[in-house]
Amino acid sequence: MNRYKIAAVNGDGIGHEIVPVGLQVLNTVADRFGFQLEVTHFPWGAGYYREHGDFMPADGLDTLRQFDAIYFGAVGLPDVDDTLPAMLYTFKVRTNFQQYVNYRPVKLLAGIEGPLRNKTGQDIDFVVIRENNEGEFVQNGKIVHGDSPYGVATDTSVFTRFGIERIAHYSFQLARRRRKHVTNVTKSNTLIHSLAYWDRVIGEVAAQYPDVTYRKMYVDAASANFVLRPEIFDVVLTTNMIGDILSDLGGAIMGSLGYGPSGNINPERTFPSMFEPIHGSAPDIAGKGIANPIGQIWSGALMLEHLGETEAAGAVLSAINAVTAQGLRTADMGGTATTQQVGEAICAELRNHA
Ligand code: NAI
Ligand code: MG
């Protein structure tokens, strides 16, 4: 029997509600397909920071690297400095573990009426591939004389040929397994050095995939197209910050941020990959049991796929679609279902007939 060691990090806020439900679904599908998840819980995040002065212990990364994958909720709390979560947890794990692919599917689930009238699950079906290790989010900057009238602040983006080439190859190879189309979402008309170089290197990689069509699109136009013509996208290849922003827009056109899944993937498997929903810790609804768990559950399906349990991953996605098709909705979609009820309905589908 295949066994996988999973590190579970609820994080903060709704993470404490949706990660357990996600694990319940994962255990159910493991039973059905005959594999085992050995889950170890780590109470890390902003809550942990309040007591220990850090988001994880000093040897936290050494601990995490012994696992096959990390199943993560989100970190951040209103009373903890919000410049810390990325630095002390999310980007720390993503960069140290070379999870340079942020894989974010955007797909309208069965039966969901999204905000885009007349757009179906055929129209809204693409993947945002966000470069996850460099770009705008390298935290390479400084505040100088911040309290004075001469205050200066910088955050300098970093783009390397190595970093651009590897995310570009990943995207074109993914496109080969999908509808063979890559859109590079950029802003090289104004970021005339960094993103012009990004475009140039991606163009060189594109030339190695003549069977994949390639186009470049500026992010302002792409934002409009996410809403007006989502059907033109297949693989959206973009930078760390643009991808962060566009994937929330992707969540929105699926109907709710609560539906969006993601994988922080290390394709070479030199370190574990980490799976989390696209949204944050949603402190405004935390503790009420009403968070939409589907992005978290779907992230679990991406984790199974990465672990090689492809059939089980497909079963989870079918079960999610069966439940959304039945009309079960949490409050973010105007419904009254609880987090737990949605999780249980998905487990029931898996046990019965998914
Ligand atoms: P957020 O994504 O947590 O929430 C934005 C809005 O979407 C809120 O109204 C929230 O209630 C709603 N929402 C999000 N997920 C939902 C779900 N599953 N079900 C129903 N409604 C949902 O973003 P926000 O408010 O900007 O940030 C809150 C905290 O999360 C901050 O501390 C931020 O730094 C952190 N954050 C952490 C991330 C991570 O750990 N990867 C990612 C994004 C934000
Ligand atoms: Mg985000």
Image: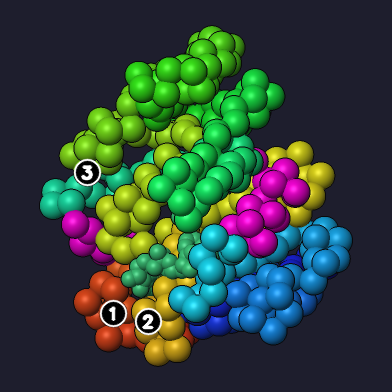
Between disc 3 and disc 1, whose residue precedes?
Answer: 3
- Mark nearest the camera among 3 and 2 is 2
Disc 2 element: loop
Q: Quadrant of residue 234?
A: top left
**Residue drawn at (59%, 64%), measured in percent from left and top?**
85
Residue located at (14% from left, 49% from top): 118
Quadrant housing the N terminus: bottom right
Q: Secondary structure at mark 3?
A: helix
Mark 3 — residue? 227
Q: Residue at x 69, y 84 (%)?
A: 51
Q: Is any atom of residue 79 visible in this view? A: yes
Q: State left or right for residue 46 relative to residue 193.
A: right
For mark 1, give the secondary structure: helix
- The amino acid type found where label 3 is placed reads Val
Residue marked by disc 2: 285
To which quarter of the image does residue 38 belong? bottom right
Q: Are marks 2 and 1 in contact (CB under 8 Å)?
A: yes
Respond yes or no on whether mark 2 lies under 8 Å from ligand 1: yes
Say if the magenta span includes residue 170: no
Q: Which residue is mark 1?
A: 331
Given the image, on which type of amino acid does mark 1 rest?
Answer: Ala
**Ligand 2 location (quadrant):** bottom left
Q: Is residue 183 visible?
A: no
Which colouring convention does the figure follow? rainbow
> How crowded is the residue under tag 3: few (<14 C-alpha within 10 Å), some, or many (20+)?
some
- The segment highlighted magenta reads 86-115
Is the residue marked by circle 1 packed among few (<14), some (14-19), or many (20+) residues within 10 Å? some
- The amino acid sitting under disc 2 is Ile
